[in-house]
Image (spheres, rainbow, N blue to C red):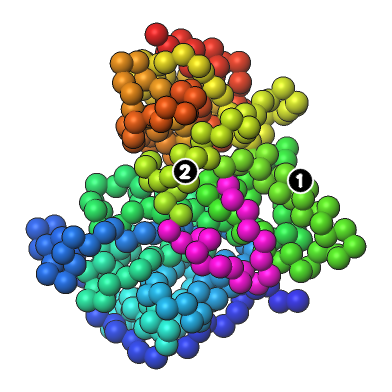
């Protein structure tokens, strides 16, 4: 069977080539934000979903499915290839004068648009949101990039983008037939390559190609694969798929980085997901959840998280972090989120009377030390 990522691109019905790589971008003051344009008064930020996955898992199959689907949504797909001209992007690269690359926005029959970025991602996003037609969503496929963390960091809190776009979630596509082998073969590697990173940073994992697993033991295999994924990242939602044919409502508008999103808070407030490293005998990439009943001093927590993320004081490599905090002299529920070295602690709403006020933080990373994390968080209490 041919790899899914080798499929031909969908046909384009119109091409609007007016952006040339190397052209001087407009001055910052010349770029109109949505709120400054009459068409987009009070327009909300457009959600951006990052799509990543191991080679051959089915990322381009997912993109083709969305670009060909009759879903009624106007979705833009950005292919961030950095020189790899494969799959869908063959339809979007032409040679300009003197061999210069010309970037094209490809209009598809179902209203979606496609483009390939060979220069600034921020500039490409700004150009997308300035288009006359309002977008419902933007997908960014990171084919050729091993680690989605840098893109997530840029999209989450990059000041250049202001309120035009918002990071919605990271979607990781994995190959159900080969995932076990990919994880096991790299289990003792000091680098912990793509398969681990992509699952660790995922908000949703699409477990693709489930039809290729032998029917006799399919249920057991899929259950074991879900355990493997949740051992690395217990926060990720898992979706089974054949050829990446998924319900778009399950991967779009997840609002995984929205501190006030109800589903996000409900997941963190659940008491039954406390995890421990007591049964873990290696320093691999995995999830750890710690709790503290006493109220914390917010300034001490900030110093504590900066020592962990910035100074690597305790030798732990943190990829993602999500949590809720109950703070001294405040009736507000605070949320903590971090991607690598970037973090955010914000008050989101008042604690409800029926809620158990607790500090609960989920860490995803490598060489996590439960005892140190519990003790050092305890030192932040009052």
Give left or right: position of 58 versus 309. Answer: right
- Labels 1 and 2: the sequence-earlier one: 1
* Quadrant location of the N terminus in the rendered image: bottom right
Give the prevailing secondary structure in the magenta stretch.
loop
Marks 1 and 2: which is nearer the front? 2
Residue that appears at 43% across and 65% down: 139
Q: Residue at x 65, y 72 (%)?
A: 243
Q: Identify which residue is drawn at 72% across, 22% down.
A: 278
Q: Marks 1 and 2, Cα distance to the nearest angstrom?
A: 31 Å
Using the image as rendered, state which of residue 162 and residue 220 is in the foreground: 220
Front residue (pair 184, 363): 363
Element under disc 1: helix
Label 2 belongs to which residue? 264
Task: Give the extent of the magenta segment.
Answer: 236-253
Q: Is residue 224 above or below residue 331?
A: below
Q: Does residue 26 show up?
A: no
Based on the displayed image, in which of its 4 quarters is residue 174 positioned? bottom right
Look at 66% across and 43% down and name the residue there.
Answer: 230
Which label belongs to residue 184? 1
Pinpoint residue 100: horizontal percent, then vertical percent. 31, 77
Position of residue 127 measured from the top left corner of the image (x, y, whole percent) = 25, 68
User: Percent from the top left, x then y, of residue 47?
Assistant: 36, 59
Callout 1 environment at 10 Å: few (<14), some (14 to 19), or many (20+)? few
Q: Name the one closer to the observer, 133 or 128.
A: 133
Q: Residue furthest left?
A: 29
- The quadrant of the picture occupied by the C terminus is top left
């Amino acid at each position: 069977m041919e790899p899914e990522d080798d499929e031909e691109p969908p046909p384009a019905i119109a091409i609007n080539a007016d952006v040339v790589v190397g052209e001087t971008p407009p001055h910052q003051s010349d770029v109109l934000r949505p709120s400054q344009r009459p068409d987009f008064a009070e327009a909300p930020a457009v959600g951006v979903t990052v799509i990543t996955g191991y080679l051959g898992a089915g990322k381009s199959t997912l993109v083709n499915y969305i670009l060909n689907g009759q879903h009624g949504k106007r979705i833009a797909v950005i292919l961030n290839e950095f020189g790899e001209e494969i799959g869908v992007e063959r339809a979007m690269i032409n040679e300009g004068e003197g061999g210069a690359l010309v970037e094209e926005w490809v209009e598809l029959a179902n209203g979606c648009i496609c483009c390939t970025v060979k220069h600034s991602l921020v500039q490409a996003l700004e150009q997308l949101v300035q288009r006359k037609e309002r977008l419902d969503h933007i997908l960014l496929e990171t084919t050729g990039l091993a680690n989605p963390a840098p893109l997530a960091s840029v999209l989450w809190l990059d000041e250049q983008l202001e309120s035009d776009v918002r990071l919605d979630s990271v979607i990781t596509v994995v190959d159900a037939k080969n995932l076990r082998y990919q994880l096991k073969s790299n289990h003792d590697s000091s680098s912990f390559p793509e398969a681990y990173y992509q699952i660790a940073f995922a908000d949703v994992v699409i477990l693709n190609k489930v039809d290729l697993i032998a029917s006799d033991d399919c249920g057991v295999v899929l259950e074991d694969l879900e355990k493997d994924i949740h051992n690395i990242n217990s926060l990720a939602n898992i979706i089974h798929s054949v050829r990446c044919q998924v319900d778009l409502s399950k991967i779009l508008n997840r609002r995984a980085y929205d501190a006030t999103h109800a589903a996000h808070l409900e997941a963190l407030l659940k008491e039954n997901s406390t995890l421990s490293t007591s049964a873990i005998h290696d320093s691999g990439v995995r999830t750890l959840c710690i709790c503290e009943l006493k109220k914390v001093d917010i300034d001490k927590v900030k110093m504590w998280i900066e020592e962990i993320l910035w100074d690597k004081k305790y030798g732990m490599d943190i990829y993602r972090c999500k949590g809720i905090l109950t703070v001294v002299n405040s009736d507000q529920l605070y949320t903590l989120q971090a991607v690598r070295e970037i973090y955010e602690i914000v008050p989101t709403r008042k604690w409800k009377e029926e809620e158990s006020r607790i500090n609960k933080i989920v860490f995803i990373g490598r060489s996590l030390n439960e005892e140190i994390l519990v003790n050092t968080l305890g030192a932040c209490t009052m």
